[in-house]
C-alpha cells in the first residue's frame, strides 16, 4: 500500500490561529450586542419617562389653572411599572407671577448603576393655553 505525499490539510498552527481569531471575533460581537441592548434599554426608559410627563402635562392643562394646587406632590406611585425599581417622581408647583403656575416635574431612576434624573417644566396660565 502506498501513501501519497500530496495529502492536503490544516496544520495545528493554522487551526490554533483560526480558533484565536474566531474567539476574538465572538468576544467583540458579544460586546457590540451587549452595548446595543443597554442603549436600547436606556432609550426605552427615557421614552417611558417622556411619555409619562407628556400625559401629566396634558392632564394639568385639562384640569385648568384653578384646580392646580401649589406645593410638592409625590408622583412615584403613578410612574409606569416598566421603569426600574426605586424610580421616583415629584412635581413642584409654584406661581412665579400672578395668573401663571409653573409645574416642575422631576423623574429619577437607576439604569444599571447610573442614576438618571430628568426635569421638565411647564406653565399653565389663568387665561388658558397661549394667553
Image (cartoon, rainbow, N blue to C red):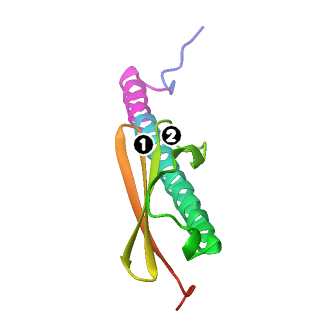
> Quick one: quadrant of the N terminus?
top right
Using the image, determine if residue 19 lies above or below residue 106.
above
Residue sitting nearer the eye, 28 or 23: 28
Crowd class of label 2 (few under 14; some 14 to 19; many from 20; radius 10 Å): some
Using the image, determine if residue 44 lies above or below residue 15.
below
> Which badge, 2 or 1, is on the more N-terminal residue?
2
Q: Which residue is mark 1?
A: 111
Is residue 121 found left or right of 78 in the rendered image? left
Residue sitting nearer the eye, 55 or 19: 55
Residue sitting nearer the eye, 95 or 116: 95
- Magenta stretch, residue numbers: 9-25
Q: Are marks 2 and 1 in contact (CB under 8 Å)?
A: yes
Q: Quadrant of residue 65?
A: bottom right
Disc 2 to disc 1, C-alpha distance: 7 Å
Name the element at disc 1.
Answer: strand
x then y, percent, for residue 121: 42, 70
Looking at the image, which residue is at 43% across and 25% down?
A: 15
Name the element at disc 2.
Answer: loop
- What is the number of the mark on residue 79? none
x then y, percent, for residue 73: 47, 53
Using the image, determine if residue 130 lies above or below residue 101.
below
x then y, percent, for residue 59: 62, 67
Magenta span dominant secondary structure: helix
Looking at the image, which residue is at 46% across and 35% down?
A: 26
Q: Which residue is mark 2?
A: 84
Amino acid at each position: 500500500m502506498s501513501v501519497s505525499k500530496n495529502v492536503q490539510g490544516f496544520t495545528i498552527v493554522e487551526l490554533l490561529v483560526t480558533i484565536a481569531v474566531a474567539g476574538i471575533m465572538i468576544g467583540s460581537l458579544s460586546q457590540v450586542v451587549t452595548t446595543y441592548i443597554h442603549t436600547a434599554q436606556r432609550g426605552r426608559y427615557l421614552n417611558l419617562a417622556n411619555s409619562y410627563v407628556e400625559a401629566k402635562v396634558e392632564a394639568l392643562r385639562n384640569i385648568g389653572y384653578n384646580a392646580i394646587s401649589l406645593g410638592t406632590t409625590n408622583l412615584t406611585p403613578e410612574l409606569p411599572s416598566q421603569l426600574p425599581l426605586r424610580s421616583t417622581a415629584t412635581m413642584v408647583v409654584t406661581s412665579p407671577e400672578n395668573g401663571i403656575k409653573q409645574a416642575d416635574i422631576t423623574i429619577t431612576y437607576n439604569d444599571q448603576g447610573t442614576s438618571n434624573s430628568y426635569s421638565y417644566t411647564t406653565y399653565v396660565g389663568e387665561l388658558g393655553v397661549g394667553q
